[in-house]
Image (cartoon, rainbow, N blue to C red):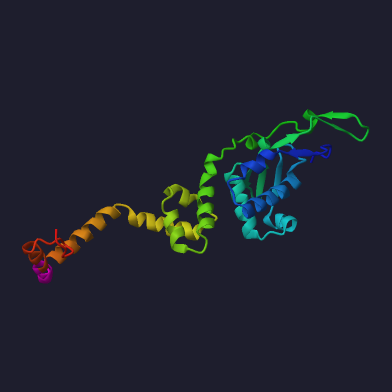
């Protein structure tokens, strides 16, 4: 561990990068990210070997929420997870960090940044792209918009690309139902609402014209030069 590192800026870029998440989830992810940074910020490459229990003690969040947040951070290319023998190693993307150029030591002598971060980890130089995680926004927005209406949620989710539904790990139940509905609808031909209304109207008119009382009324109006209301033309 490099104890000479005084402090490090976390840029606003990470906050805006998480704008695609809803408020509560965003705050949980930021909380988990800060816990990872607590152990990674003084190490070259910004790596930390952590267990969920450690993050739980720091944040107070349940393990299910912590796991979901770490998966989200990984999908957003903020924190990359690498599985090891005794747990996982988390690597923070340096795109969202900004180190100080110089730091004074105990004798107030400036220490150059090269002495602090000797060599950035290649694994931490992964590209941060919002496009790869847009489906999080789609799915979470649908769940939030139609909260409590299971049928509408599944219907709206079934309109999303299959790959997005299969890759989501935070809403497995709803995504599974949406995938099933999506597959059931494949190959089926749907008739537009206008055609259905026109067909029903035509059927109603045919039934009406076949009615003997209707026929008698029409003939009576014709003989007496009356309109369909029975009034003189």
Q: Residue furthest right?
A: 107
Q: Quadrant of the C terminus?
A: bottom left
Q: Residue furthest front?
A: 232
Give whichever of 228, 99 is nearer the camera: 228
Residue 204: x and y in percent read 19, 63
Give whichever of 192, 123 is nearer the camera: 192
Residue span colored magenta: 210-216
The answer to whether 146 is drawn above or below residue 125 in the figure is: below
Residue 87: x and y in percent read 66, 52
**Residue at the (67%, 52%) spot, across then down:** 27
Is residue 10 toward the left or the right of residue 110 in the image? left
Q: What is the quadrant of residue 119 in the picture?
A: top right
Is residue 13 toward the left or the right of residue 207 in the image? right
**Residue at the (59%, 49%) spot, across then down:** 21
Is residue 33 toward the left or the right of residue 207 in the image? right
Is residue 143 toward the left or the right of residue 200 in the image? right
Give whichever of 134, 122 is nearer the camera: 134
Report the magenta stretch's main SS: helix
Q: Is residue 147 visible?
A: yes
Residue 173: x and y in percent read 49, 61
Q: What is the quadrant of residue 48 in the picture?
A: top right
Q: Is residue 87 visible?
A: no
Give whichever of 70, 160 is nearer the camera: 160
Magenta-drawn stretch contains 73: no
**Residue at the (48%, 63%) spot, across then down:** 149
Q: Quadrant of the N terminus?
A: top right
Q: What is the quadrant of residue 101 in the picture?
A: top right
Q: How many marks?
A: 0
The answer to whether 180 is drawn above or below residue 13 in the figure is: below
């Amino acid at each position: 561990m490099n104890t000479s590192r005084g402090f490090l800026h976390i840029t606003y870029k990470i906050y805006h990068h998480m704008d695609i998440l809803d408020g509560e989830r965003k705050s949980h992810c930021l909380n988990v990210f800060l816990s990872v940074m607590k152990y990674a910020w003084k190490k070259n490459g910004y790596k930390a070997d952590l267990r969920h229990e450690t993050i739980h003690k720091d944040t107070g969040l349940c393990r299910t929420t912590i796991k979901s947040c770490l998966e989200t951070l990984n999908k957003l290319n903020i924190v990359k997870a690498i599985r090891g023998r005794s747990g996982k190693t988390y690597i923070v993307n340096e795109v969202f960090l900004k180190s100080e150029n110089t730091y004074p030591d105990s004798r107030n002598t400036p220490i150059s940044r090269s002495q602090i971060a000797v060599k950035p980890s290649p694994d931490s130089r992964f590209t941060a792209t919002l496009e790869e995680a847009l489906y999080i926004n789609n799915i979470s927005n649908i769940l939030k918009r139609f909260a409590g209406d299971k049928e509408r949620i599944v219907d709206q989710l079934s309109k999303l690309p299959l790959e997005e539904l299969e890759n989501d790990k935070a809403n497995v139940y709803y995504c599974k139902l949406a995938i099933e509905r999506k597959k059931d609808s494949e190959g089926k031909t749907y008739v537009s609402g206008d055609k259905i209304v026109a067909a029903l109207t035509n059927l109603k008119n045919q039934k009406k014209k076949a009615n003997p009382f209707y026929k008698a009324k029409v003939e009576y109006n014709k003989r007496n030069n009356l309109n369909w209301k029975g009034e003189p033309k």
